[in-house]
Amino acid sequence: MSGEATYEDITVLKEIAELLNEGTDTKAVLSGVLQKLLQVTGLQTGWIFLIDGRGRHELIADVALPPALLNQDKLRMCQGKCWCVNRYNNHELNKATNIIECKRIEDAMADEAGNTCGLTHHATVPLRAGEERFGILNVGSPYKTHFEKNELALLEAVAFQIGTALKRIKLTHREQETALIAERNRLARDLHDSVNQLLFSLSLTARAGVEMTSEEEVKQTFRYIQDLTQEALGEMRGLIWQLKPQGLENGLVSALSSYAEMIGLSIESKMSGAVSLPGKVEEALWRIGQEALANCKKHAGTNAAMLSFQAGENEVKMTIQDAGCGFHYDENSPILSLGLRNMKTRTEALNGQFEVTSRLGSGTTIHIQIPL
């Protein structure tokens, strides 16, 4: 990169600023920014790691990685530790760092994993907004072993913009989740006030029809309508609970116990520890617990379950167990059940661990562990 910015450079920087200011899809935004940044700097290769609070990194964007780092669907970039990630996690990476020899490249060369195209070093820049940290930006070029001060200054300026954009995207997603919850609550009220009452009226009408006629065939028809209506009422109540869990304000265990009672499941609950759960964690645990209890009622062949909830300063654990018929489960095979997949997805979205233990004739245990 030359010492003076050209008109083209300024145009690309303007495009970077616009992309960071307007985009809401993290992966798309960072991929676009990385490509434009390499264009304006004249560098050839770059990648961005997002790093969570537990120090786990995710390759969110990359451009022109050498073949040695592309093997096995970029496995070398997605797993393992390296010096830049370690420095970031140890809070030793606070500004653009001139040159870091790439451990991933060195390991690839030692393993003869493929062509590295002359890439041996990279500059590393932390991504942050104020005190909040998001990850690191790495850029380099074949045979380049030194970055000038003006190059590092530009990288740091763009990194600050990226950090601010990530903060904005995070807040936008939080607002969207809040709006979604509000809309779900509105829908629950509408279902309760309209459809639920219509079904109840239909049930009363069918019961009156049974008493008003003397013909047995007509009575049977009205009884059938009444049974269908009662079943629909039960499904509707369950749906309303799923949309808006009444009693969640009294705590997660209380809400799940009430839900179990509503669907006809006897539940023994055990709770230890006390902590105010973040809204997203409480919502996820509620949905996971609800799915697990519903599965128990429908598939386990038992009307009893046990709920265990442990809350600590750094994590929360929830276990739902039944002594029902169980099923064959292999943790190394793909999960075929949509309900189990949903529970696993919700757990891992919060960096948690999801475990299922089940055997035919020996019941099922669902264990959830989520960091706080």
Image: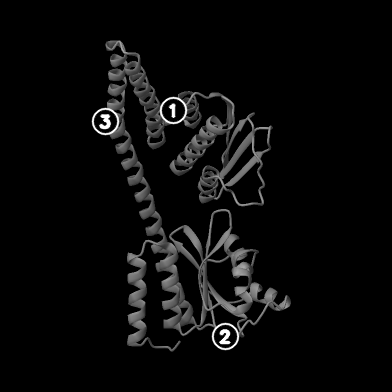
For label 2, the crowd category at 10 Å Cα-Cα, with few meaning under 14, some 14 to 19 and many 20 or more, is some
Q: State which quarter of the image contains the N terminus.
A: bottom left
Q: Is residue 314 visible?
A: no
User: Which is more foreground, mark 1 or mark 2?
Assistant: 1
Q: Is residue 366 visible?
A: yes
Which residue is under mark 1? 250
How far apart are the two marked residues, 1 and 3, measured between alpha carbons?
Answer: 26 Å
How far across and how far down the image is residue 239, in percent?
A: 39, 34
For label 3, the crowd category at 10 Å Cα-Cα, with few meaning under 14, some 14 to 19 and many 20 or more, is few
For label 1, the crowd category at 10 Å Cα-Cα, with few meaning under 14, some 14 to 19 and many 20 or more, is few
- Indicate left or right for 228 with 125 as reference: left
Amino acid type, mark 1: Asn
Q: Secondary structure at mark 3?
A: helix
> How is colour applied across the structure in the image?
one colour
Which residue is under mark 3? 194
- Indicate left or right for 172 with 48 as reference: left
How far across and how far down the image is residue 255, in percent?
A: 46, 29
User: Which is more foreground, mark 2 or mark 3?
Assistant: 3
Q: Earlier in the sequence, mark 2 or mark 3?
A: 2
Q: Secondary structure at mark 1?
A: helix
Amino acid type, mark 2: Lys
How far apart are the two marked residues, 1 and 2, measured between alpha carbons?
Answer: 60 Å
* Residue contact at pointers 2 and 3, CB within 8 angstroms: no
Which residue is under mark 2? 144
Residue drawn at (28%, 16%), measured in percent from left and top?
A: 209
Amino acid type, mark 3: Ser
Q: Secondary structure at mark 2?
A: loop
* Residue contact at pointers 1 and 3, CB within 8 angstroms: no
How far apart are the two marked residues, 2 and 3, measured between alpha carbons?
Answer: 69 Å
Q: Earlier in the sequence, mark 1 or mark 3?
A: 3
